[in-house]
Each structure stands twice: as C-alpha cells, then as structure tokens.
Image: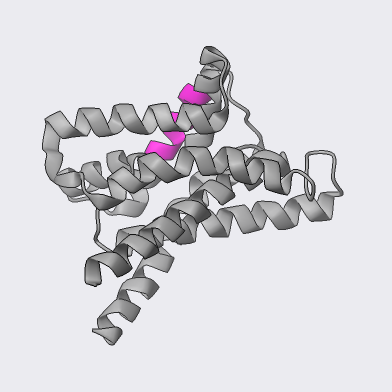
Amino acid sequence: MLTFKKTIKVAFAFLCNGMAISLFILAGFGLDSISVFSAGLANVFHTTVGMASLGFYFVVILVTFFVDRRYISGATVLSLIIVGPSIDLFTKVFSHIVSPESEIAVRILFFVLAWLSLSFAVALYLSTHFGISGAEMIPVIVSDKTHRQFRWCKVAFDITVIIVGILLGGAFGVGTIIVGFITGPTIQFFRRKLEKGNETSD
C-alpha cells in the first residue's frame, strides 16, 4: 500500500511538472532551465519540446545506470513515461486559454502558476523518497557526492543548462533568468514542508 501511495503521489507530481513546463511555453516569458535545453534539442532535432525532454531524460537515466544505479527507481521510470508526453498534452489543452499574445496580466498569472507548480512537483516527488526524475538526477547526485546543499547545486545546474540551451537555439527570456535563480530555493521550501508533514502523519 505504501508503494502504491508513493506511486500515485509521484505520478501526480510529474503531471504537475509537465503542466508547469507547458505553461512556461505558453506564457512566453522564457522557459524554465531544463525546457530551454530541451527546446534547444527540439530545435536541433526538429521535434517537440516534450519529445526532446523524453530523449534527454532517457540519456541521463542511461548514464546514471552505469555510474550509480542506486539513484534509479520507481520515480525515475515514471518521469520517463509521464513528463515528456504530458508537456505536449497540456500545451494543447492550455493553448486556448493563454499564449504569448494574451494580455500581460494573464501571462504573468500563468507564469507564476508554472513556477509554483514546477517547484511543488519537484519537492513532492523528492519528499516521497521514491527516487528522482531524470531532470533532477544530476543536481541531486552532485549534492550527495559533494555534500553541498541541494538548492545551490540546483541553481548551478539550471544556469549551466540555460547557457547550453541558448546556444542550441532554445527559447530564452527574462522569465528564464528569474526561474533559474528562484526555483531551487522554492523547491527546498516546499520539500521541508512536505517532509515535515510526512513525519507528522507517520
């Protein structure tokens, strides 16, 4: 039963993750860090951001399997199945509500919603201790191996993939810079709250 509950939580988290990325795309202020990189890959390989994300996650998971397979578990597999396809799905669903041509207030509202959804999603699946997704695997491993706080490893990782993504032609904007600096600390905030709640319920 515990594994089932964790699976449901993690699946929900990855759906929120996919929704957040789609809203970043539609709000038009610039994508989050991973999506800038994925958009760059999509530009190079002439595919969708969702499918490019799927490919990126697969490569990261494959490398991790040979480096330290202890980091691969249920959440890792679910991220591979859910996140990429859900980006394309939610982009189609919300494109009727918000787009880069929408009123500025609407775009800001959906940008903030995207940021909070992404931060909550990452914190939720990390707090379940059911494994990590391909998107967060690199900063989590670096944090564990170097004994540095996750938030700063996340910020460094985000900045790196943003730069590479831009060089590959990924969509970049002021929102990308904002999210690159604030997502790590926000994830840390939500994660503490969720893990405290898990301890209380045990």
Between 45 and 116, which is closer to the camera in this rendering?
45
Residue 87 lies, with reference to residue 39, above or below; the image says below
User: Which residue is found at the position 72% from the left and 44% from the top?
Assistant: 27
Residue 58 lies, with reference to residue 80, above or below; the image says above
Magenta segment boundaries in residue numbering: 157-165
- Quadrant of image for the N terminus: bottom left
Q: Would you say 11 lies left or right of 118 here?
A: left
Residue 143 at x, y = what percent? Answer: 23, 47
- Quadrant of image for the C terminus: bottom left
Residue 185, visible in the rendered structure: no
Is 135 part of what is drawn in magenta?
no
User: Which residue is found at the position 46% from the left and 43% from the top?
Assistant: 83
Q: Would you say 146 lies left or right of 117 here?
A: left
Q: Quadrant of residue 122?
A: bottom left
Residue 2, visible in the rendered structure: yes
Residue 102 at x, y = what percent? Answer: 85, 45
Between 193 and 159, which is closer to the camera in this rendering?
193
Q: Would you say 202 lies left or right of 158 here?
A: left
Tally of numbered tags: 0
The colour scheme used to paint the residues is one colour
Q: Quadrant of residue 137?
A: top left
Residue 96 at x, y = what percent? Answer: 79, 46
User: Which residue is found at the position 49% from the left and 53% from the top?
Assistant: 15
Residue 54 at x, y = what percent? Answer: 43, 32
Is 163 part of what is drawn in magenta?
yes
User: Which residue is found at the position 13% from the left and 45% from the top?
Assistant: 70
Q: Of helix, strand and loop, which mostly describes the magenta segment?
A: helix
